[in-house]
Image (tube, rainbow, N blue to C red):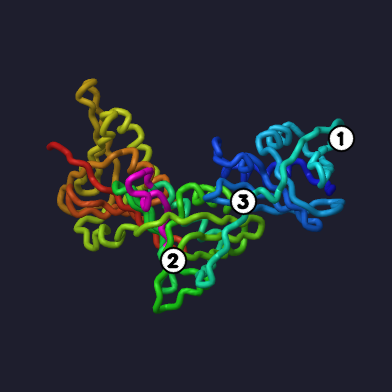
Amino acid sequence: MKFIVSSTELLGHLQAISRVINNKNTLSILDNFLFDLQGNTLFMTASDIETTLITSMQVDSAEGEGKVAIASRLLLDTLREFPEQPLSFDINNSNLAMVITSANGSYNFIGQNGDEYPRLPEMQEDAQSLSLSVPQLSSGISKTLFCTADDELRPVMNGVYFDIKDKEVTLVATDAHKLARFTVPYLNSSVTDEQQAAFILPKKPAAMLKNILPKESGEVNITFDNKNARFSLSKYTMVCRQVEGRFPNYAGVIPQSNLHRIILDRLSFVNALKRVSVFSNQASNLVKLDFSVNQLRISAQDIDFSISAEETINCQFGGEALKIGFKSSFLIEILNNISSSDIVLELSDASRAGLILPFEKEKDEDVLMLLMPMLIND
Protein backbone atom coordinates (compact mmCIF):
# COMPACT_ATOMS: atom_id res chain seq x y z
CA MET A 1 0.00 0.00 0.00
CA LYS A 2 1.08 3.56 -0.70
CA PHE A 3 -0.01 7.02 0.44
CA ILE A 4 1.25 10.60 0.79
CA VAL A 5 0.73 12.60 3.99
CA SER A 6 1.73 15.92 5.57
CA SER A 7 4.67 15.40 7.98
CA THR A 8 3.44 17.86 10.64
CA GLU A 9 -0.18 16.70 10.48
CA LEU A 10 0.87 13.07 10.88
CA LEU A 11 3.20 13.98 13.77
CA GLY A 12 0.42 15.90 15.54
CA HIS A 13 -1.95 12.90 15.42
CA LEU A 14 0.71 10.42 16.51
CA GLN A 15 1.92 12.60 19.40
CA ALA A 16 -1.66 12.88 20.68
CA ILE A 17 -2.14 9.10 20.82
CA SER A 18 1.44 8.21 21.82
CA ARG A 19 0.78 9.14 25.46
CA VAL A 20 -1.19 5.90 25.78
CA ILE A 21 1.88 3.74 25.15
CA ASN A 22 3.64 2.49 28.29
CA ASN A 23 7.43 2.52 28.67
CA LYS A 24 7.34 -1.19 29.52
CA ASN A 25 4.70 -3.27 27.75
CA THR A 26 3.91 -6.91 28.43
CA LEU A 27 3.26 -7.39 24.68
CA SER A 28 5.99 -6.15 22.34
CA ILE A 29 3.40 -5.32 19.67
CA LEU A 30 2.15 -2.52 21.97
CA ASP A 31 5.42 -0.63 21.40
CA ASN A 32 4.03 0.06 17.93
CA PHE A 33 1.44 2.27 16.26
CA LEU A 34 -1.10 0.37 14.17
CA PHE A 35 -1.59 1.94 10.72
CA ASP A 36 -4.77 0.87 8.92
CA LEU A 37 -5.33 2.36 5.45
CA GLN A 38 -8.94 2.24 4.24
CA GLY A 39 -9.49 4.13 1.01
CA ASN A 40 -8.15 7.66 1.50
CA THR A 41 -8.43 7.46 5.30
CA LEU A 42 -5.52 6.43 7.50
CA PHE A 43 -6.51 5.12 10.95
CA MET A 44 -3.75 5.17 13.60
CA THR A 45 -4.04 3.27 16.89
CA ALA A 46 -2.05 3.23 20.14
CA SER A 47 -2.89 0.95 23.07
CA ASP A 48 -1.73 -0.37 26.43
CA ILE A 49 -4.51 -3.04 26.54
CA GLU A 50 -6.43 -1.08 29.22
CA THR A 51 -6.81 2.04 27.05
CA THR A 52 -6.89 2.27 23.26
CA LEU A 53 -6.84 5.56 21.35
CA ILE A 54 -7.63 5.76 17.64
CA THR A 55 -7.28 8.77 15.37
CA SER A 56 -7.81 9.23 11.64
CA MET A 57 -6.77 11.62 8.88
CA GLN A 58 -7.15 11.98 5.14
CA VAL A 59 -4.17 11.08 2.92
CA ASP A 60 -3.33 11.76 -0.73
CA SER A 61 -2.61 9.39 -3.61
CA ALA A 62 -3.65 6.28 -1.68
CA GLU A 63 -3.09 2.92 -3.37
CA GLY A 64 -4.20 -0.36 -1.86
CA GLU A 65 -5.32 -1.09 1.69
CA GLY A 66 -3.88 -2.94 4.66
CA LYS A 67 -2.60 -2.92 8.23
CA VAL A 68 0.93 -2.61 9.56
CA ALA A 69 2.40 -2.04 13.04
CA ILE A 70 5.26 0.49 13.11
CA ALA A 71 7.75 1.11 15.96
CA SER A 72 6.38 4.19 17.71
CA ARG A 73 9.60 5.65 19.09
CA LEU A 74 11.50 5.29 15.81
CA LEU A 75 8.69 6.85 13.79
CA LEU A 76 8.14 9.77 16.19
CA ASP A 77 11.86 10.54 16.46
CA THR A 78 12.07 10.61 12.65
CA LEU A 79 8.98 12.78 12.11
CA ARG A 80 10.06 15.36 14.71
CA GLU A 81 13.06 16.28 12.60
CA PHE A 82 11.11 17.08 9.42
CA PRO A 83 9.95 20.58 8.50
CA GLU A 84 6.45 20.73 6.98
CA GLN A 85 6.50 18.71 3.76
CA PRO A 86 4.69 15.82 2.06
CA LEU A 87 6.03 12.35 2.93
CA SER A 88 5.45 9.31 0.75
CA PHE A 89 4.86 5.95 2.49
CA ASP A 90 5.40 2.76 0.49
CA ILE A 91 4.63 -0.45 2.41
CA ASN A 92 5.10 -3.96 1.02
CA ASN A 93 2.10 -5.94 2.32
CA SER A 94 3.89 -9.28 1.97
CA ASN A 95 7.14 -8.68 3.88
CA LEU A 96 6.09 -5.42 5.66
CA ALA A 97 9.16 -3.52 4.46
CA MET A 98 8.38 0.19 4.53
CA VAL A 99 10.07 3.16 2.87
CA ILE A 100 9.33 6.78 3.79
CA THR A 101 10.46 9.17 1.07
CA SER A 102 10.94 12.89 1.74
CA ALA A 103 12.11 15.71 -0.53
CA ASN A 104 15.75 14.93 0.25
CA GLY A 105 16.02 11.31 1.31
CA SER A 106 14.48 7.94 2.14
CA TYR A 107 14.09 6.04 5.40
CA ASN A 108 13.63 2.27 5.72
CA PHE A 109 11.56 0.57 8.40
CA ILE A 110 10.44 -3.01 8.98
CA GLY A 111 6.88 -3.26 10.22
CA GLN A 112 5.07 -6.01 12.11
CA ASN A 113 1.91 -7.88 11.23
CA GLY A 114 -1.02 -5.57 12.03
CA ASP A 115 -3.32 -8.55 12.69
CA GLU A 116 -1.32 -9.28 15.87
CA TYR A 117 -2.44 -5.96 17.35
CA PRO A 118 -5.04 -6.37 20.15
CA ARG A 119 -8.63 -5.92 19.01
CA LEU A 120 -11.01 -3.43 20.56
CA PRO A 121 -13.38 -4.89 23.17
CA GLU A 122 -16.98 -5.22 22.00
CA MET A 123 -19.65 -3.27 23.86
CA GLN A 124 -22.40 -5.37 25.45
CA GLU A 125 -25.95 -5.22 24.08
CA ASP A 126 -27.23 -3.44 27.20
CA ALA A 127 -24.66 -0.63 26.88
CA GLN A 128 -25.93 2.86 27.72
CA SER A 129 -25.14 6.04 25.80
CA LEU A 130 -24.64 9.70 26.63
CA SER A 131 -23.91 12.82 24.56
CA LEU A 132 -22.20 16.01 25.74
CA SER A 133 -20.76 19.00 23.95
CA VAL A 134 -16.96 18.97 23.68
CA PRO A 135 -16.57 22.15 25.82
CA GLN A 136 -18.76 20.63 28.56
CA LEU A 137 -16.70 17.44 28.84
CA SER A 138 -13.42 19.34 28.49
CA SER A 139 -14.38 21.71 31.31
CA GLY A 140 -15.69 18.87 33.49
CA ILE A 141 -12.53 16.77 33.23
CA SER A 142 -10.22 19.78 33.68
CA LYS A 143 -12.03 20.83 36.87
CA THR A 144 -12.11 17.37 38.47
CA LEU A 145 -9.06 15.40 37.29
CA PHE A 146 -6.66 17.14 39.70
CA CYS A 147 -8.63 15.71 42.66
CA THR A 148 -8.13 12.06 41.70
CA ALA A 149 -6.05 9.92 44.05
CA ASP A 150 -3.09 7.56 43.64
CA ASP A 151 -4.27 4.96 46.11
CA GLU A 152 -3.50 1.29 45.44
CA LEU A 153 -5.73 0.22 48.35
CA ARG A 154 -8.77 2.17 47.08
CA PRO A 155 -8.62 2.05 43.27
CA VAL A 156 -12.12 3.56 42.95
CA MET A 157 -10.60 6.89 44.05
CA ASN A 158 -8.13 6.79 41.14
CA GLY A 159 -10.54 8.11 38.54
CA VAL A 160 -13.35 10.49 37.63
CA TYR A 161 -16.85 9.29 38.55
CA PHE A 162 -19.61 9.90 35.98
CA ASP A 163 -23.03 9.99 37.70
CA ILE A 164 -25.94 10.21 35.22
CA LYS A 165 -29.42 10.99 36.53
CA ASP A 166 -32.19 13.64 36.39
CA LYS A 167 -31.17 14.76 32.86
CA GLU A 168 -27.73 15.77 34.16
CA VAL A 169 -24.29 14.26 34.36
CA THR A 170 -22.14 14.91 37.41
CA LEU A 171 -18.37 14.38 37.30
CA VAL A 172 -16.76 13.83 40.70
CA ALA A 173 -13.21 13.18 41.85
CA THR A 174 -11.79 12.97 45.35
CA ASP A 175 -8.65 11.84 47.17
CA ALA A 176 -10.33 12.04 50.63
CA HIS A 177 -8.65 15.42 51.32
CA LYS A 178 -10.17 17.44 48.49
CA LEU A 179 -13.19 16.91 46.26
CA ALA A 180 -14.38 18.44 42.98
CA ARG A 181 -17.93 18.14 41.66
CA PHE A 182 -19.01 19.38 38.21
CA THR A 183 -22.61 19.10 36.95
CA VAL A 184 -24.02 19.92 33.51
CA PRO A 185 -27.20 18.97 31.62
CA TYR A 186 -26.41 16.40 28.92
CA LEU A 187 -27.55 16.74 25.30
CA ASN A 188 -29.20 13.30 25.19
CA SER A 189 -28.89 9.91 26.82
CA SER A 190 -30.35 6.41 26.77
CA VAL A 191 -30.65 6.66 30.57
CA THR A 192 -34.32 7.41 31.29
CA ASP A 193 -35.56 9.85 33.95
CA GLU A 194 -36.39 6.96 36.31
CA GLN A 195 -32.95 5.37 35.92
CA GLN A 196 -29.51 6.15 37.24
CA ALA A 197 -26.28 5.04 35.59
CA ALA A 198 -22.65 5.55 36.54
CA PHE A 199 -19.09 4.52 35.75
CA ILE A 200 -15.56 5.44 36.88
CA LEU A 201 -13.16 6.71 34.20
CA PRO A 202 -9.53 5.90 35.18
CA LYS A 203 -7.04 8.73 35.60
CA LYS A 204 -4.89 7.89 32.56
CA PRO A 205 -7.64 7.95 29.90
CA ALA A 206 -9.13 11.02 31.61
CA ALA A 207 -5.77 12.76 31.16
CA MET A 208 -5.75 11.66 27.50
CA LEU A 209 -9.15 13.28 26.99
CA LYS A 210 -8.01 16.46 28.74
CA ASN A 211 -5.24 16.81 26.12
CA ILE A 212 -7.37 15.89 23.11
CA LEU A 213 -10.65 17.74 23.78
CA PRO A 214 -9.30 21.31 23.28
CA LYS A 215 -8.44 20.32 19.67
CA GLU A 216 -11.98 19.05 19.01
CA SER A 217 -15.42 20.60 18.50
CA GLY A 218 -19.02 19.45 18.31
CA GLU A 219 -20.28 16.56 20.43
CA VAL A 220 -18.79 13.66 22.37
CA ASN A 221 -20.74 10.42 22.25
CA ILE A 222 -20.06 8.21 25.26
CA THR A 223 -21.07 4.53 25.26
CA PHE A 224 -20.53 2.41 28.35
CA ASP A 225 -21.41 -1.02 29.73
CA ASN A 226 -20.34 -2.57 33.03
CA LYS A 227 -16.69 -3.01 31.95
CA ASN A 228 -15.69 -0.53 29.24
CA ALA A 229 -16.38 3.02 28.10
CA ARG A 230 -16.03 4.42 24.59
CA PHE A 231 -15.62 8.14 23.81
CA SER A 232 -16.29 9.02 20.16
CA LEU A 233 -15.14 12.39 18.80
CA SER A 234 -14.83 13.71 15.25
CA LYS A 235 -11.12 12.80 14.91
CA TYR A 236 -10.51 10.48 17.86
CA THR A 237 -12.06 7.39 19.45
CA MET A 238 -10.99 6.18 22.88
CA VAL A 239 -11.99 2.87 24.45
CA CYS A 240 -10.92 2.12 28.01
CA ARG A 241 -11.50 -0.30 30.85
CA GLN A 242 -13.47 1.22 33.72
CA VAL A 243 -12.34 1.19 37.34
CA GLU A 244 -14.30 -1.58 39.02
CA GLY A 245 -15.91 -0.96 42.39
CA ARG A 246 -18.32 1.34 44.18
CA PHE A 247 -17.49 5.04 44.32
CA PRO A 248 -17.88 6.66 47.79
CA ASN A 249 -21.10 8.52 48.61
CA TYR A 250 -19.78 11.95 47.64
CA ALA A 251 -23.05 13.76 48.43
CA GLY A 252 -22.81 12.65 52.06
CA VAL A 253 -19.55 14.53 52.72
CA ILE A 254 -20.67 17.88 51.25
CA PRO A 255 -21.92 20.20 54.05
CA GLN A 256 -25.44 21.43 53.31
CA SER A 257 -25.51 24.45 55.60
CA ASN A 258 -22.58 26.74 56.37
CA LEU A 259 -22.77 29.68 58.78
CA HIS A 260 -20.06 31.78 57.15
CA ARG A 261 -19.97 33.02 53.56
CA ILE A 262 -16.89 34.95 52.41
CA ILE A 263 -16.30 36.51 48.97
CA LEU A 264 -12.68 36.89 47.85
CA ASP A 265 -10.81 38.05 44.77
CA ARG A 266 -9.41 34.75 43.51
CA LEU A 267 -6.14 36.08 42.08
CA SER A 268 -5.30 38.17 45.15
CA PHE A 269 -6.03 35.18 47.37
CA VAL A 270 -3.89 32.78 45.29
CA ASN A 271 -0.92 35.15 45.09
CA ALA A 272 -1.00 35.85 48.82
CA LEU A 273 -1.18 32.11 49.56
CA LYS A 274 1.80 31.42 47.29
CA ARG A 275 3.92 34.06 49.04
CA VAL A 276 2.97 33.10 52.60
CA SER A 277 3.12 29.31 52.04
CA VAL A 278 6.86 29.58 51.30
CA PHE A 279 7.26 30.07 55.07
CA SER A 280 5.06 27.11 56.07
CA ASN A 281 6.32 23.86 57.51
CA GLN A 282 7.48 21.74 54.56
CA ALA A 283 5.93 18.58 55.96
CA SER A 284 2.45 19.95 56.70
CA ASN A 285 2.24 22.93 54.28
CA LEU A 286 -0.22 24.45 56.79
CA VAL A 287 -1.52 28.00 56.31
CA LYS A 288 -3.89 29.67 58.78
CA LEU A 289 -6.80 31.80 57.59
CA ASP A 290 -8.02 34.30 60.18
CA PHE A 291 -11.26 36.00 59.12
CA SER A 292 -12.56 39.23 60.67
CA VAL A 293 -14.93 41.87 59.33
CA ASN A 294 -13.99 42.40 55.65
CA GLN A 295 -10.43 41.21 56.23
CA LEU A 296 -8.51 37.97 55.90
CA ARG A 297 -5.13 37.47 57.58
CA ILE A 298 -3.12 34.62 56.02
CA SER A 299 -0.22 33.31 58.10
CA ALA A 300 2.28 30.46 58.15
CA GLN A 301 5.31 29.49 60.18
CA ASP A 302 8.02 26.87 60.41
CA ILE A 303 9.20 26.64 64.03
CA ASP A 304 12.14 24.39 63.10
CA PHE A 305 13.70 27.14 60.99
CA SER A 306 12.33 30.11 62.99
CA ILE A 307 10.61 31.63 59.95
CA SER A 308 7.09 32.99 59.58
CA ALA A 309 5.00 35.21 57.32
CA GLU A 310 1.62 36.86 57.31
CA GLU A 311 -0.37 38.92 54.85
CA THR A 312 -3.73 40.68 55.01
CA ILE A 313 -6.15 41.00 52.09
CA ASN A 314 -9.65 42.42 51.76
CA CYS A 315 -12.73 40.24 51.58
CA GLN A 316 -16.50 40.49 51.97
CA PHE A 317 -17.30 39.01 55.36
CA GLY A 318 -19.55 40.29 58.12
CA GLY A 319 -19.78 37.38 60.55
CA GLU A 320 -18.02 36.49 63.79
CA ALA A 321 -14.25 36.04 63.73
CA LEU A 322 -13.18 32.63 62.46
CA LYS A 323 -9.86 30.78 62.20
CA ILE A 324 -9.27 27.71 60.04
CA GLY A 325 -6.20 25.89 58.70
CA PHE A 326 -5.70 24.33 55.25
CA LYS A 327 -2.92 22.59 53.37
CA SER A 328 -1.78 25.45 51.14
CA SER A 329 -0.81 23.34 48.12
CA PHE A 330 -4.32 21.81 48.01
CA LEU A 331 -6.01 25.19 48.41
CA ILE A 332 -3.89 26.78 45.66
CA GLU A 333 -4.59 23.84 43.36
CA ILE A 334 -8.34 24.21 43.87
CA LEU A 335 -8.26 27.99 43.27
CA ASN A 336 -6.23 27.47 40.08
CA ASN A 337 -8.98 25.19 38.76
CA ILE A 338 -11.75 27.78 39.18
CA SER A 339 -12.13 30.19 36.28
CA SER A 340 -14.23 32.85 38.07
CA SER A 341 -12.47 36.11 39.03
CA ASP A 342 -14.14 36.02 42.49
CA ILE A 343 -14.73 32.98 44.66
CA VAL A 344 -17.11 32.18 47.51
CA LEU A 345 -15.74 30.43 50.58
CA GLU A 346 -18.41 28.70 52.69
CA LEU A 347 -17.29 27.63 56.17
CA SER A 348 -18.96 26.26 59.26
CA ASP A 349 -16.17 25.95 61.82
CA ALA A 350 -12.47 25.07 62.05
CA SER A 351 -13.11 21.31 62.09
CA ARG A 352 -15.50 20.96 59.15
CA ALA A 353 -14.87 20.88 55.41
CA GLY A 354 -14.84 24.17 53.57
CA LEU A 355 -16.59 24.72 50.24
CA ILE A 356 -15.02 26.83 47.48
CA LEU A 357 -17.40 27.97 44.74
CA PRO A 358 -17.10 30.29 41.72
CA PHE A 359 -18.89 33.61 42.36
CA GLU A 360 -19.71 34.05 38.66
CA LYS A 361 -21.16 30.78 37.36
CA GLU A 362 -20.78 29.60 33.78
CA LYS A 363 -24.06 28.96 31.95
CA ASP A 364 -25.56 25.53 32.85
CA GLU A 365 -22.45 24.61 34.90
CA ASP A 366 -22.50 23.86 38.62
CA VAL A 367 -18.98 23.69 40.08
CA LEU A 368 -18.23 22.88 43.71
CA MET A 369 -14.85 22.26 45.37
CA LEU A 370 -14.42 20.88 48.89
CA LEU A 371 -11.33 20.90 51.09
CA MET A 372 -10.84 19.24 54.46
CA PRO A 373 -9.25 21.50 57.12
CA MET A 374 -6.07 20.87 59.11
CA LEU A 375 -5.77 21.10 62.87
CA ILE A 376 -4.39 24.40 64.14
CA ASN A 377 -2.95 24.87 67.62
CA ASP A 378 -4.11 28.28 68.82
Quarter the C terminus occupies:
top left
The answer to whether mark 1 and mark 3 are in CB contact below 8 A is no
The magenta region covers 149-162
Using the numbered discs, state the Cα–Cα distance from disc 3 to disc 2 in whole angstroms.
32 Å
> Foreground mark, 3 or 2?
3
Q: Which residue is mark 2?
A: 169
Q: Any magenta on residue 177?
A: no
Q: Is residue 290 left or right of residue 216?
A: left
State the count of labels: 3
Number of the label disc, if any, that sits on residue 243? none
Number of the label disc, if any, that sits on residue 103? 1
Residue sitting at x 28%, y 34%: 285
Whether 169 is drawn above or below 206: the answer is below
In front of the other: 326 or 243? 243
- Mark 3 crowd level (few <14, some 14–19, many ≥20, 10 Å Cα): some
Q: Is residue 62 left or right of residue 17?
A: right
Q: Which residue is mark 3?
A: 118
Residue 19 at x, y = what percent? 57, 42
